[in-house]
Image (tube, rainbow, N blue to C red):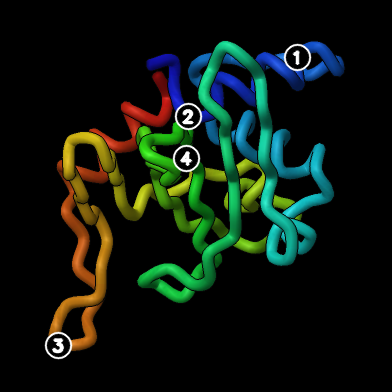
Amino acid sequence: MHGLFFTLALALRRRGFFFWRDRAHENRGQIIAAYGGLERLRGNYIRLENPPYMRLVVEYIGQGPRGLPAIAAAHYYEQNGDAVRDPEMVFEVNPDEKGLASWKDGEWCPVSFRQDSLDVYQEAVFVCDAKQVAICPKLVVRLKEFARE
């Protein structure tokens, strides 16, 4: 697995975009900006086919646990006619266009990880029964590392 955005990065590299392994958050911002930005993503998902890799879909899925925009990124394959996530990660992003904390240049916070074929679902940030936001710091760190691969 070369990371969730590997397929899209290869296609965008042909268009003049360059990517650095330690700057994954900027790569994701470049990808969304290339397709019209966060506002456009709210109404239209990004789907990229780049054989032989699995298709990549990036979509806005509403608000995350902290009330920030949530973006899902997933590779998909088909099994018995169903789309299977392999894997999917959900991130919360700051909706600002500019600045160190913006969705273009800032740190994306992983919220969850799903791997359908292994029946794995992990939530790193969620709202608990007391309506409080709960964070699993070790899982957040692991998911950030995975997203950089």
Q: Earlier in the sequence, mark 2 or mark 3?
A: 2
For label 4, the residue is: 74
Q: Earlier in the sequence, mark 1 or mark 2?
A: 2
Q: CA distance from mark 2 to mark 3?
A: 33 Å
Task: Report the residue marked by disc 2.
Answer: 4
Asked if marks 2 and 3 touch (Cβ < 8 Å), the reply is no
Quadrant location, the C terminus: top left
Question: Whole-Å distance between the Cαs marked 1 and 3?
Answer: 46 Å
Residue at image coords 44%, 42%: 81
Q: Nearer the viewer, residue 7 or 146?
A: 7
Crowdedness near tag 2: few (<14), some (14–19) or many (≥20) residues, C-alpha within 10 Å: many
Image vertical order of residue 75 relative to residue 22, above or below: below
Q: Earlier in the sequence, mark 2 or mark 4?
A: 2
- The residue carrying mark 3 is 130
Instruction: Please name which of the two marks, 1 or 3, marks the residue nearer to the observer.
Output: 1
Does the residue at mark 2 contact the one at mark 4 (Cβ under 8 Å)? yes
**Mark 1 falls on what kind of element?**
helix
Q: Residue 8's spot in the image, x, y percent?
A: 65, 25
Q: Nearer the viewer, mark 4 or mark 3?
A: 4
Q: Amino acid at mark 4?
A: Ala
Q: Secondary structure at mark 4?
A: strand
- 44 relative to 148 in the view: left or right: right
Disc 3, SS: loop
- Residue 144 vs residue 61: left or right? left
Q: Is residue 23 above or below residue 139?
A: above
Disc 1 or 3, which lies upstream in sequence? 1
Is 129 located above or below residue 106 in the figure? below
